[in-house]
C-alpha cells in the first residue's frame, strides 16, 4: 500500500475507532498526518479509486479536492488485514516487536499522546494506557499483558516520573524481561531518582519544542533494530 494512503487510512481509523460514520476534512487529515494538501489530495484520490473511502465533494474546500472523507468497510478490511500481517511479520515467541509500551506519569499524558502519534505515524504500534484501555476494563491485567507482549519500552522522563510507583514497576518489569528501554529525558538524568534509567541510550535535552523530532529519532532506531532482528537481542553494555 502506498505510504501516504496507509498513513491517512490508519490515522482516520485509529482516531474514529468504532465510529464508522465519522468524516474527516482535509485540515483534520493534515493535522493527523503532517502531509501537505497536494499529498493528501493524491492519496485520497487513490483511495477513492480503489473504493477504500467515501467522500463528499463541495464548494469552498480549496486547497482540497473534497469536503470530507471517511473509510468504508473495504478500507476497514484493508486496515485489519495490514495490521494482522504486520503483527505476524514481527512476532517472535509471543512478543510483538512492532509494539512499543509507553511508560509515563499521568501528569504527562499530553506529552505521551504526542509521542504515541509519532510512533504510529511511522508504522509502529504504541500502547498508551489512558487512551488504549477502555473505561470498563481493569488496568492492571491489561498493563501487564502489554508489558509482556511489547518489543520495547519507551519511558517519558520528567520530574513527575520517578515519583509514581507504577512507572517504576513498569521499568522494572521491562528490565526483568530483558526488554530494550528507550528513555526520553525532559529533565536532567539523575541516578538518585531514576535508578538505572540514565544508563540506557535514549534522547537527552528534550523539551516540548523538539519532542516530536526526538520521538521520530527513537522510532527510526526501533524500526532499524526490528528490521535487522536486533530489537530482542538485549545485552547490557
Image: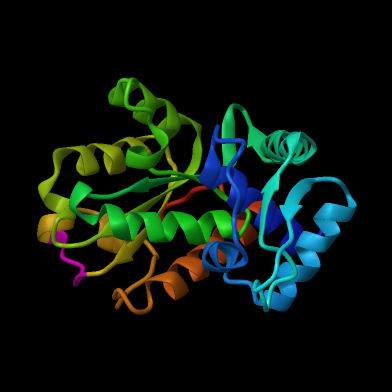
The residue drawn where x is 51% and y is 70% is 217
Q: Give the image quarter of residue 203.
A: bottom left
Q: In which quarter of the image is the C terminus?
A: bottom left
Residue nearer the viewer, 26 or 168: 26
Q: Position of residue 65 (x, y in %)?
A: 75, 70
Q: Please determine whether, in this image, residue 32 is positioned above or below residue 141.
A: below
Q: Please determine whether, in this image, residue 28 is positioned above or below residue 74.
A: below
Q: Please determine whether, in this image, residue 90 is positioned above or below residue 227.
A: above
The residue drawn where x is 28% and y is 52% is 109
Q: In the displayed image of the protein, which residue is found farthest to the front?
A: 59
- Answer yes or no: is residue 229 visible: no
Where are the magenta residues, as a range?
Answer: 187-191
Horizontal side of 201 relative to 120 (left or right) equals left
Residue nearer the viewer, 204 or 50: 50
Horizontal side of 12 relative to 82 (left or right) equals left
- Answer yes or no: is residue 93 visible: yes
Q: Where is residue 85 in the image (x, y as percent from the top left)?
A: 75, 37
Q: Give the image quarter of residue 74.
A: top right
The residue drawn where x is 29% and y is 75% is 207
Q: Please determine whether, in this image, residue 99 is positioned above or below residue 148.
A: below
Check residue 90 for magenta coloring. no
Horizontal side of 43 relative to 154 (left or right) equals right
Amino acid at each position: 500500500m502506498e505510504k501516504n494512503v496507509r498513513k491517512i487510512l490508519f490515522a482516520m481509523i485509529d482516531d474514529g475507532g468504532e465510529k464508522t460514520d465519522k468524516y474527516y476534512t482535509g485540515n483534520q487529515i493534515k493535522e493527523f498526518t503532517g502531509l501537505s494538501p497536494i499529498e493528501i489530495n493524491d492519496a485520497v484520490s487513490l483511495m477513492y479509486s480503489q473504493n477504500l473511502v467515501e467522500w463528499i465533494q463541495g464548494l469552498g474546500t480549496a486547497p482540497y479536492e473534497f469536503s470530507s472523507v471517511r473509510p468504508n468497510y473495504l478500507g476497514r478490511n484493508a486496515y485489519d488485514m495490514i495490521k494482522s500481517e504486520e503483527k505476524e511479520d514481527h512476532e517472535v515467541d509471543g512478543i510483538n516487536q512492532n509494539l512499543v509500551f509507553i511508560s509515563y506519569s499521568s501528569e504527562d499524558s499530553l506529552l505521551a499522546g504526542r509521542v504515541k502519534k509519532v510512533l504510529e505515524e511511522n508504522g509502529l504500534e504504541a500502547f498508551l494506557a489512558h487512551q488504549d484501555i477502555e473505561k470498563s476494563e481493569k488496568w492492571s491485567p491489561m498493563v501487564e499483558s502489554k508489558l509482556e507482549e511489547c518489543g520495547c519500552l519507551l519511558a517519558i522522563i520528567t520530574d513527575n516520573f520517578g515519583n509514581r510507583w507504577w512507572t517504576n514497576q513498569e521499568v522494572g518489569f521491562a528490565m526483568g524481561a530483558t526488554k530494550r528501554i528507550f528513555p526520553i529525558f525532559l529533565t536532567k538524568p539523575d541516578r538518585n531518582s531514576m535508578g538505572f534509567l540514565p544508563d540506557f541510550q535514549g534522547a537527552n535535552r528534550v523539551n516540548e519544542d523538539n519532542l516530536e523530532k526526538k520521538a521520530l529519532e527513537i522510532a527510526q532506531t526501533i524500526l532499524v533494530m526490528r528490521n535487522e532482528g536486533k530489537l530482542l537481542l538485549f545485552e547490557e553494555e
